[in-house]
Amino acid sequence: MDGFPILTVMLAVPLVAAIACLFLDAVSARWTALGATLINLGLGIVLWLGYDIGGAQWQFIERAELFAGFSYALGIDGIALMLIVLSVFLMPICILASWEAIQKRVGEYMAAFLLMELLMIGVFAAQDMFLFYIFFEAGLIPMYLIIGIWGGDNRIYASYKFFLYTLLGSVLMLIAMLWMVNQAGTTDIPTLMNYDFPPAAQTWLWLAFFASFAVKMPMWPVHTWLPDAHVQAPTAGSVILAGVLLKMGGYGFIRFSLPMFPEASAQFVWLILGLSMVAVVVTSLIALVQHDMKKLIAYSSVAHMAIVTAGLFAFNVQGLEGAMIMMLSHGLVSGALFLCVGIIYDQLHTREIDRYGGLAINMPKYALFFLLFTMASIGLPGTSGFVAEFLSLAGVYEVSSTATFVLTTGIILGAGYMLYLYRRVAFGEQKNADAAAMKDLSVREWLMLGPIAAAVLWMGIYPESFLAPMRADIAALDARISRAAPQGDAKLVAGEPREGIANEMPETEHNAEGAH
Amino acid sequence: MEFANSFYFTAPEVGLTVSGLILLLVAAFVGQKTTRLITILAVAALFGAAAFTGNLLTNSAFELGADAWGGLYRMDAFGSFAKILIYLATIGCLIVTPKFFEQTAEYRAEYPILMLFGAVGMGMMVSASDLMTLYIGLELSSLSSYVLASFIRSDMRSAEAGLKYFVLGALASGILLYGMSLIYGFTGSTSYIGIRTALEGGVSAGSMFGIVFLLAGLAFKISAVPFHMWTPDVYEGAPTPVTAFFSTAPKVAAIAMTMRMALDPFGGQIEIWQQIVIFAALASIIVGALGAIGQENLKRLLAYSSINNVGFILIGLAAGTEQSASAMLVYLAIYVAMSLGSFVALLMLRDNDGNQLETFADISGLSVTRPALAWCLLALMFSLAGIPPLLGFWGKFVVFQAAVEADMILLAAIGIAASVIGAFYYIKFIKVMFFDKPADVVVAEKSSARWVVLGLCVLFISPLGYLATLKLGEFADRAASALFFII
């Protein structure tokens, strides 16, 4: 693997395919896009397999001094690796989801998606702060086009809102970055992650970064662009938005805010926890009263992302790991839920919950998948959602039991709105003849939902595969920020370690007999 | 020797003047048959001047620059950098012009000749190191511009634009001249070095008035708020190729002249003009952004966009450091490409009858009917809005970086936040072209010359342009250090 610039290749493949798609007709554009995303998925798997767990913190490093003021520097750690794998995993599924739903201007659509993939990988792989910013910000262009050209009826409003909201958030971050680079004299992210900025300046810098990441996340109360964007975007657009774009906010917190400004992060713990608590409760309640399926899932995303932010700012390993798993899990689960909505939307062309009912009768396979993802969203043990919520909340508990209490109600409310949604869509009587006549999953739809379902179960049953690459990086981050960790109210006391293992069976006669 | 050197250093201007005069005679005696030939020769002359200036910029023998004509004129990297931009922009504008007048057959040989004289004037503006040279250059370029603005004699709007430009331009020249006379009266010198030396002891109230008047006159020339009112009217009324010219070459010249003026003779008194420039910068950004929002006419919209861009460039001037001067030059280079590209794309919007289209309604759904043109415009608009990965972002980036390094964080923060307002109307452009129903009135453009100019501009502002940032930054640094060399 040495010397092969795999990250650059992962950027180049979608770029080349995107340019090709612009000039191709609909059918070849679809196949080209699928081919390119599958190649990238293959490269992503190679990347994962080639990643040396326990090796150097930054691997697959590439560097070239191509530009004035910043350099073309790529490299990943375990955290970036998992997010890249998530992106390349979701992309072929997105292309499949758009296979029949998109009929106009297919070449341009595929090109926009491939560019999106390029930019997402770039964001997670960039090791230069300005290169990161360019990738981070450039994502606005394809997403604006995806929402605006292929979106629903109110797409213009949604695309404007998406664009201007996120742009306003990130320009302030740029000023903060300029100041930091001026102060530290380098644009190298790994170096900056260990640079101690004066605490007084950290406050301002943290707020500037917060403005960007909070909008991207999105955190309450700057989340309002998300339901609009989700509802209007085409299915695959929603999947990418929920699956990967929202993760850029969380990635930003974990890569910039926490390691670069530990003191300021500690100072603002209660801002984050407060906003997260409000977000969980308020958006869950809003989700309960939605009539539009996509809107409901969009609000549930805000609630889940609030658990991510709370976990991140718990300043301990459980919280950070939980937040990361939550991001991965939410990427899969909410993506899958949007796909589920898309599948029935493609047939009936409405997202109105009341128009459906009793789908379990005529679409049993669909109902099964939908149930699995509903349960994963709620956090049923055995699915990825449980691991994510448990770890995050265990982390938050060390900081504040009150916050944990409020955040946990979100899970109950989450069960409420998700089960209520499922009951209305899949159970009950078949109110409408057209909904009752819908066909069950096609092979293409199997190919979309099957891999996600497998990944959700894998992450729920054996999360170690996903935690292992990140362990060293999260430990390093925890060590970096521990000096500023806030005093928790849990007052955990380490007890006397017992002798022998906890589940050791007492030496009884019966047991001895069994040993024969 | 001194004399020969002076000729050598001013060769681009001398050469262009001579070519202009000869071509004028040819046009006068041979008549309008030669229009095409004269255009080609004018372009060739400008190419020659650009190449010669390029040599002056890159040749290490001239690194320190030199005075010509007894200190009236200064040849240095700064002037050369600006002049190359001016010449290239003028060439670009000349190439795309003839087709525009095809319909009305109003293209005459005076057009390229006026452009040539304008280029001479602009070259003098950026190289002047004496108020007298500066004023002569300024008037030479302004008078050419007035005539060009009203070049379509049959069009009322064009005539009105020319008249408006002339009256307001003359007023601005008057203000500028009054400022110069005050400066001369209170410092006893018209040369930049003389003024600087005289002001070293402190600024009297009279010279301060002079500085303020000078800045007001210059603000008019670069169309900075609050002296911007003429811009939308003139841009809308003038023939589109002339508007393309106005928004590029004269703008570069005026901004470069302002930079030299502010940083050389008044470079020791930054605190006096700094707040004026800060106000003008922020006001230009905000007014330029807000004014554009309600516009239906694309030329008017781009006029406001140019006001907006001047605001960003002035942020660099407000910082007043060598690095910020370099950033301004980088921004100028990128701005010229974006502006020229946008206007060339506008030129390509013609309907079946050959009428020029210039409203939002006409470009509705352009991405379906004319995809290549629409994608070029998309890149240009996102670039003007400063969205990465297009090169327009890099221009804003270096300017804000310079401001942050000069510890003007608040200015940078307000400026960049206001840029979001500007993004609103740039993305409206995209929205109309890509999201709306096709109007299908624009016919395909066949002129390959226009496609070449547009293609080059788009290529430069595309992400590939970042590969040029190293070289561009190096030249801009050299030019900026030449500007600060006198000190």
Image: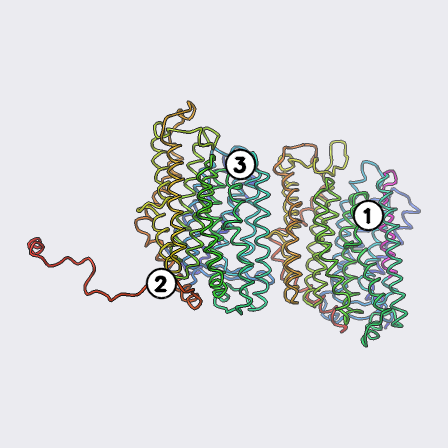
Q: Nearer the viewer, residue A371 or B345?
A: A371
Q: Which element is circle 1 on?
A: helix
Residue A106: mark in rendering: 3
**Circle 3 marks a residue in which chain?**
A
Q: Where does the magenta region start and end?
A: B135-155
Residue B39: mark in rendering: 1
Please state the horizontal and vertical placement of residue A512, each as a whole percent of the image.
Answer: 7, 56
**Circle 1 marks a residue in which chain?**
B
Q: Nearer the viewer, residue B199 or B381?
A: B199
Going by the numbered disc 2, the residue's amino acid type is Gly
- Residue B415 appears left or right of A360: right
Can marks 2 and 1 be said to lie on one chain?
A: no
Disc 2 packing (10 Å; few <14; some 14–19; many ≥20): few
CA separation in Å, label 1 and label 3: 44 Å
Quarter of the rendering containing residue B196: bottom right
Please state the horizontal and vertical placement of residue A88, each as a whole percent of the image.
Answer: 44, 48
Can marks 1 and 3 be said to lie on one chain?
A: no
Q: In the rendered structure, which disc, 3 or 2, sits on the residue that comes first in sequence?
A: 2
Front disc: 2 or 1: 2
Front disc: 3 or 2: 2
Callout 3 touching callout 2 (CB < 8 Å): no
Going by the numbered disc 1, the residue's amino acid type is Thr
Residue carrying label 2: A54
Above or below, B235 relative to B15: above
Quarter of the rendering containing residue B330: bottom right
Image quarter where the C terminus of chain A lies is bottom left
